[in-house]
Image: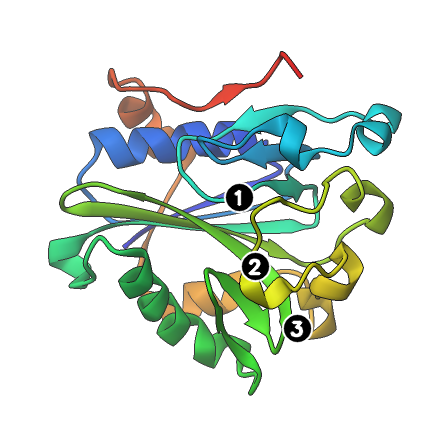
Amino acid sequence: MNLLELHNCPIFEQLQIEEALLRTDQENWCILNHGSPPAIVFGISGKPHLHIDPVHFSKNPVPLIRRFSGGGTVLTDPNTLFVTFICNVKDTHVPCSPREILSWTEELYGPLFNHPAFHIQENDYAFGEKKFGGNAHYLTRDRWLHHTSFLWSYDPEAMKMLALPPKQPTYRQNRSHDEFLTTLSNHLPYKLALFDSLKAHLSHTCKSMRDIEPILSRPHRKATHFITDF
């Protein structure tokens, strides 16, 4: 597994990196990032007018980004921890199926969190009935991507920019953000504990931005873009 650790990398740039590694490379990758400036990120079919509260958004607008993968809408800030896996089926023996991928990551993360209430709630990572990590996937015939935004903490006022989604997981039961969410700061000893645990657990080769520059320059489809018409 190649490991690329980023610091203060905007989520837009991270998504561009992920898209290039997915589409033009054939190796397995784990990407870690923290310190990204605030943004709202939509899945490939997400509709901003359904997911943003215009009153709260107008008070402190942030960049709007449409990523190349599916999944829901997420508000990110410097306290969001990002973990992405880009893997080959033949190497991981994990089929290109969200359920199978989540089963693999649940087994991976379980010992790292070491929390009796940790489990998969539909497509989310949760402690009990409270979500702390949201996931999205991109699947090809023999290669898959799984990216997660973990909440170390969040600003309740900023979170009000997100309206309650029209389509939500059953276990949410129309709860407000504060009632529905929990944070890793309540469960881990320090901010980068998860990253340190992953690096200790995974057999990996560290890579740098210089290492991947040739990959990023290869021609490929680029679906990640800023939304400018909201």
Q: In which image quadrant can residue 115 be found?
A: bottom right
In the rendered image of this protein, does residue 126 appear above or below residue 10?
Answer: below
Separation (CA) of disc 2 from disc 3: 14 Å
> Disc 1 or 3, which lies upstream in sequence?
1
What residue is at 70 percent from the left and 63 percent from the top?
A: 180
Q: Which residue is labeled 3 in the image?
A: 188
Amino acid type, residue under disc 1 in the picture: Gly
What residue is at 63 percent from the left and 63 percent from the top?
A: 172
> Disc 2 or 1, which lies upstream in sequence?
1
Amino acid type, residue under disc 2 in the picture: Gly
Q: Where is residue 132 in the image (x, y as percent from the top left)?
A: 62, 63
Q: Which residue is labeled 2 in the image?
A: 133
What residue is at 66 percent from the left and 66 percent from the top?
A: 184
Q: Which residue is labeled 1 in the image?
A: 72
Query: At numbered mark 2, what does the secondary structure look like: helix, strand or loop?
Result: strand
Query: At numbered mark 3, what does the secondary structure look like: helix, strand or loop?
Result: loop
Q: Which mark is residue 7?
A: none
In the rendered image of this protein, does residue 204 appear above or below residue 212?
Answer: below
Separation (CA) of disc 1 from disc 3: 25 Å
Circle 2 Cα neighbour tier, 10 Å, few/some/many (<14 / 14–19 / ≥20): many
Residue projecting furthest to the left:
90
